[in-house]
Image (cartoon, rainbow, N blue to C red):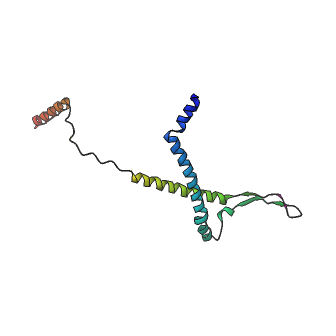
């Protein structure tokens, strides 16, 4: 029974619950940003470069093999770099959005009031004595 109690205590810690909530919200946020990139940002970019859909960009390494009836015997081997470009755009936008959100949250935190300048404590007795000796030596040199 001790193992179950320890697990329950671990699972109910604030940090674990906060992390779980963050992961769930992060997953949903990732889907929103992926949709934003794929459906809002990439179509105009594709239009600007000649109506290209980035997910369709690929290099065919080996052509597909068809039989006499036109059915695919062996599918084509392709290098789908367009999908990679799409994912890189997703990542950059998610990273920028998270950076902006954290920066905004840090600005919301109340900055501590600067401490009022206080008079410095008097120097220790030995330092005061050395200062007096220095001043006397300067006076005698003149």
State the residue at coordinates (55%, 32%): 6
Give the overall secondary structure of the magenta segment. Answer: loop
Q: Position of residue 110 (x, y in %)?
A: 36, 50
Q: Residue at x 59, y 69 (%)?
A: 44
In the rendered image, the vertical position of residue 11 relative to residue 53, given as above or below = above
* Quarter assignment of residue 37: bottom right
Q: Residue 10: percent from the left, percent from the top?
A: 53, 36
Q: Quadrant of the C terminus?
A: top left
Please, is residue 13 above or below residue 58 in the view?
Answer: above
Picture layout, residue 45 above or below residue 122: below
Q: Residue furthest right?
A: 68
- Left or right: 55 in relation to 131: right
The residue segment tinted magenta is 66-73
Q: Residue at x 54, y 38 (%)?
A: 11
Q: Is residue 131 magenta?
A: no
Give the answer, above or below, for where 17 lies relative to 73: above
| The residue positioned farthest toward the front in the image shown | 1
So how many labels did they put on this image? Answer: 0
The one nearer the camera, 132 or 11, is: 11
- Quadrant location, the N terminus: top right
Task: Tell me what residue is drawn at x 52 percent, y 35 percent.
Answer: 9
Image location of residue 56, percent across then percent down: 69, 63
Q: Position of residue 14 (x, y in %)?
A: 49, 41
**Left or right: 43, with 62 as reference point:** left
Q: Left of 70 or right of it: where is 44? A: left
Query: Quick check: 134 left or right of 8?
Result: left
């Amino acid at each position: 029974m001790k193992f179950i109690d320890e697990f329950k205590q671990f699972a109910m810690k604030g940090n674990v619950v906060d992390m779980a909530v963050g992961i769930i919200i992060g997953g949903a946020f990732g889907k929103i940003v992926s949709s934003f990139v794929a459906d809002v940002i990439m179509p105009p970019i594709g239009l600007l470069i000649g109506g290209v859909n980035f997910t369709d960009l690929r290099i065919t390494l080996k052509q597909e093999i068809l039989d006499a009836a036109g059915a695919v015997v062996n599918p084509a081997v392709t290098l789908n770099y367009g999908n990679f470009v799409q994912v890189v755009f997703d990542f950059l936008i998610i990273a920028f959005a998270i950076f902006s959100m954290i920066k905004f949250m840090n600005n919301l935190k109340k900055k501590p009031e600067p401490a009022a300048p206080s008079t410095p404590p008097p120097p220790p007795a030995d330092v005061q004595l050395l200062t007096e000796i220095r001043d006397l030596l300067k006076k005698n040199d003149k």
